[in-house]
Amino acid sequence: MAQVYGRVALIGLGLIASSMFWAMKRGGVAGEVTGYARSEATRETARRIGLCDRVFDSAEEAVEGADLVVLCVPVGAMGPVAEAIAPHLKPGATVIDVGSVKQSVIDAVGPHIPEGVHFVPTHPMAGTEHSGPESGFAELFDNRWCLVVPGDADEAAVAAVEAYWQALGANTERMEVGHHDLVCAVVSHVPHLIAYTMVGVADDLRRVSDQEVIKFSAAGFRDFTRIAASDPTMWRDVFLSNKDAALEILGRFTEELFALQRAIRTGDGDLLFDYFTHTRAIRRGIVQAGQDTDKPDFGRIGGRA
Amino acid sequence: MAQVYGRVALIGLGLIASSMFWAMKRGGVAGEVTGYARSEATRETARRIGLCDRVFDSAEEAVEGADLVVLCVPVGAMGPVAEAIAPHLKPGATVIDVGSVKQSVIDAVGPHIPEGVHFVPTHPMAGTEHSGPESGFAELFDNRWCLVVPGDADEAAVAAVEAYWQALGANTERMEVGHHDLVCAVVSHVPHLIAYTMVGVADDLRRVSDQEVIKFSAAGFRDFTRIAASDPTMWRDVFLSNKDAALEILGRFTEELFALQRAIRTGDGDLLFDYFTHTRAIRRGIVQAGQDTDKPDFGRIGGRA
């Protein structure tokens, strides 16, 4: 465990930033961590729970003298924040963001980054359904992947950013921006939209009461509700800013769903059986890669949940 | 804890039957438990791990003298099994099934039940992504719901079946058959189909490799893979036998998905935000009702998964 940056500034103090803070403290990754959140209530909570060594009332003050500035705000807020802090960035500093979409963040943030400051877009593929400054924990990134989209950024700056994420517990992988946005549409964005939709349908169906949906949710539905409890602002921005990839994957999804729907209608049991057998293999791969537990039902058991 | 039935016969020895066996042993719910599975390998495994007090090579022998016979086979196999055992059922015995669909099971099993034998369709709303005789555990039904669809069955027989499921740890609720099949289409069948579809899309997309899907799955996708790892035979039969309700809910789902897709295309952030806010409430209800854990990410944390 070694210090990677002297001073780190966290802009935005939600689940990701607070987890980064605790992971930095655990590993001695930064000399000092400053923080800023737009909401006064969030700043007060942060001061109360000791989140950040110093919490400032403006982003401009928080980034003063920082070697690394981390933008942890919803994707739609990245541009304005970058514009506000730009004149206050230390020469030679590095700016990273943790947004789930990369092309739109690069478009919004890039133009504001001053000459002599490095901008390295990153995306830690980790999270929970909880949000806010009190939801973070040091282990969030352990053995998860952080995607780095360096573009033509300075190699030494990129290498330092990779060392930083690895010190927080993550594995890193470099990726081209367009491929990043497509991969995330598949493994994250569209699954979230589908979960939101399924929960919305259940909630809206007058012939089945919400009480019934809640009581009998262990039959599959409840897993969707966890994902559909994620932060609404974050997800609104994700879909608005990764429109093309999300719509492409959604198109594939509905095409495939219609094929299965047709098999149900026509009673084509062989097609259904083959499809359902095929999808088991991916699950095995995920468990073998250490990306999920093999314990039944994620380790939740009966009344002990 | 008290004995509810003298002799119980389990026909089919997968996840549900094996969990029922261990729950019966835990609670002293049955005097003796006999079992039968179609596959010789399953019967051998059952004998090896002590699943059932006696394992028979035919269903006819297994039900001989049983006070309760539990049909634990896929929905599509219920009719033939009922036909085979019917002449061997003890007068006054009760037959229950654990199928996820009720109208088609009633249609398939009902005509074979002899005069003087009670048939009480039931559906324990519990399961995991694992299957087979070694996947069962005594706690599976604890605090879960078992739906009972009594129709015009004898009241004393129905009450005994309810006492039996409660002794296995479950809560029971009576439901009309059509409503049962609709509720299950919403909370279980369509969520499973959607999960299978999403995993199929990811697996099939040539521009994103399976290795990438697996590595980066923690961003939401992996939850779908758990559900999509469920038993293919069971789920094929569920969709073929609950066709009308499944197609109705699928219709609602695609209608709703298209509305969100249109909001993404037109950039209607307010619609997305409102939708995503609304769905959080259902999650809270499920956690408050004790049907899921509030621990972040189902209690899976980082590399400890």
Image: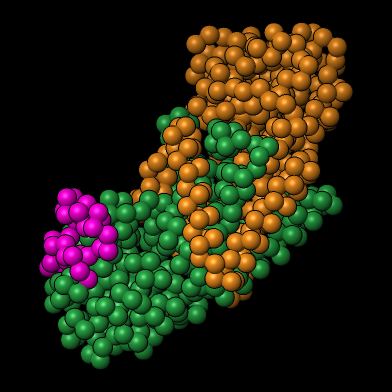
Chain colours: A orange, B green
Residue B256 location, quadrant: bottom right
Q: In the displayed structure, would residue B112 be above or below residue A62? A: below
The residue closer to the viewer here, A50 or A195, is: A195
Pinpoint residue A69: horizontal percent, then vertical percent.
71, 19
Position of B148 with respect to A53 (left or right) is: left
Where is B254 relative to A16, above or below? below
Image point (84%, 29%), residue name? A107
Image position, residue A223 (x, y; %): 51, 52
**Which residue is drawn at the image coordinates 81% and 21% (left, top)?**
A85
Give the percent coordinates (x, y) of residue A92: 76, 8
Instruction: Please tell me which residue is depicted at 52% across the width and 22% down the height of the picture.
Output: A169
Residue A204 in the image: above or below residue B117: above
* Residue B254 magenta: no
Q: Which residues are magenta?
A: B30-59
From the viewer's perspective, is B104 left or right of B159?
right
In the rendered image, residue B35 lying in the magenta stretch gets the answer yes
On the picture, is B213 further left or further right than B84? right
The answer, for residue B285, to whether it is visible in the render is: no
Picture residue at 66% right of the left edge, 68% below the top: B251
Residue occupying the far bottom of the picture: B115
